[in-house]
Amino acid sequence: MPEAKRMVGEWFPVQFVWKLPDGDFIRAVFRAVILDTIPAADKYLVRLDELLAGRQESKDGEMRPKEAMTIPYWVLVREIIGNQVTLAYEVEDGRPLHMRLTTLVGEHDFFTRYNQYKRQ
């Protein structure tokens, strides 16, 4: 059974990856601050405080230069900052979380469903 290795108040980097309609990939690494643990679900409740790094790659893994990046999607990536999400304890291993594009464009509430619990 997985266990939390970190405590409330600590942070760790978490990497999300989305495949864009043109075949490119966006990788974004956020600073995830632990707000709470949910032992019954083996999850952390975290706030994505800061965008630490990001890149856009072709389907072959070639990094796109800044001027070739798909700006509308990067605007959405920046809008994730400050949102609260639950993440499985295993996310600490550093592997990227491959997400559906619907989570980035807001058709799925993954990045917004816990915002009602935001702490002041």
Image: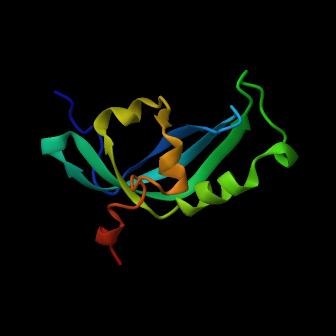
Quadrant housing residue 78: bottom right
Residue at x 57%, y 39% (from the top left corner): 18
Hey, which residue is sitting farthest left in the picture?
40
Q: x, y (%) of residue 31?
A: 50, 51
Q: x, y (%) of residue 11?
A: 41, 50
Frontmost residue, 114 versus 38: 114
Frontmost residue, 76 versus 81: 76
Residue at x 53%, y 44% (from the top left corner): 101
Hey, which residue is sitting farthest top in the picture?
60
Quadrant housing residue 41: top left
Frontmost residue, 54 versus 114: 114
Frontmost residue, 81 versus 6: 81
Q: x, y (%) of residue 24?
A: 70, 34
Residue 41 vertical position relative to residue 107 in the rendered view, above or below: above
Residue 57 vertical position relative to residue 14 in the rendered view, above or below: above
Residue 32 vertical position relative to residue 119 in the rendered view, above or below: above
**Residue 85 vs residue 100: left or right?**
left
